[in-house]
Image (spheres, rainbow, N blue to C red):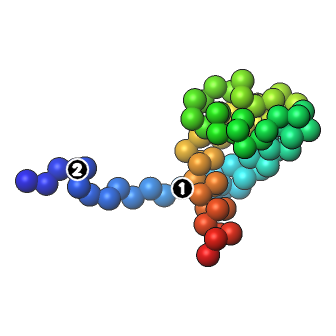
Amino acid sequence: MSSHLDKTMMFSGNRDEMNQAEQAILLAYEALKVKGYNPVHQLVGYLISGDPAYITSHNDARNTIRKVERDDLIEELVRAYMANHK
């Protein structure tokens, strides 16, 4: 007997949302760097917890990144990583 856990689910993102995700990630990264934070650590903290306090409000980075679903942010990060490692 097969369960739904045995099947691979399809996930498809919206390219417009990916562009917004890319912009939000870059804005947050730069704002965190300017404020003296480790941007990678802070972004990971936000992506894992969903707590916007990990992102500085400098240059409206916190509000901008909150407008994008976290799964879209993760999808953009994976897409960019794979594009750079082919």
- How many neighbours does mark 2 have within 10 angstroms: few (below 14), some (14-19), or many (20 or more)? few
> Which amino acid, mark 2?
His
Residue 81, relative to residue 71: is it above or below? below
Where, by quadrant of the figure, is residue 38 drawn? top right
What residue is at 72 percent from the left and 35 percent from the top?
42
Where, by quadrant of the figure, is residue 48 drawn? top right
What residue is at 72 percent from the left and 53 percent from the top?
22
User: Of all residues shown, which one is farthest toward the right?
Assistant: 34
Residue 8, relative to residue 31: is it above or below? below
Residue 9 relative to residue 48: left or right: left
Residue 3, relative to residue 50: is it above or below? below
* x and y percentages locating residue 60 in the rendered image: 84, 32
What residue is at 59 percent from the left and 48 percent from the top?
74
Q: Of helix, strand and loop, which one carries label 1?
A: loop
Give the camera-side residue of 6 and 63. Answer: 6
Reading the image, the residue beneath label 1 is 13
User: Of all residues shown, which one is farthest toward the bottom?
Assistant: 86
Residue 59 visible to the viewer: no
Reading the image, the residue beneath label 2 is 4
> Which amino acid, mark 1?
Gly
Q: Of helix, strand and loop, which one carries label 2?
A: helix
Q: Earlier in the sequence, mark 2 or mark 1?
A: 2
Where, by quadrant of the figure, is residue 29 drawn? top right
Q: Which mark is residue 28?
A: none
* x and y percentages locating residue 70 in the rendered image: 59, 40
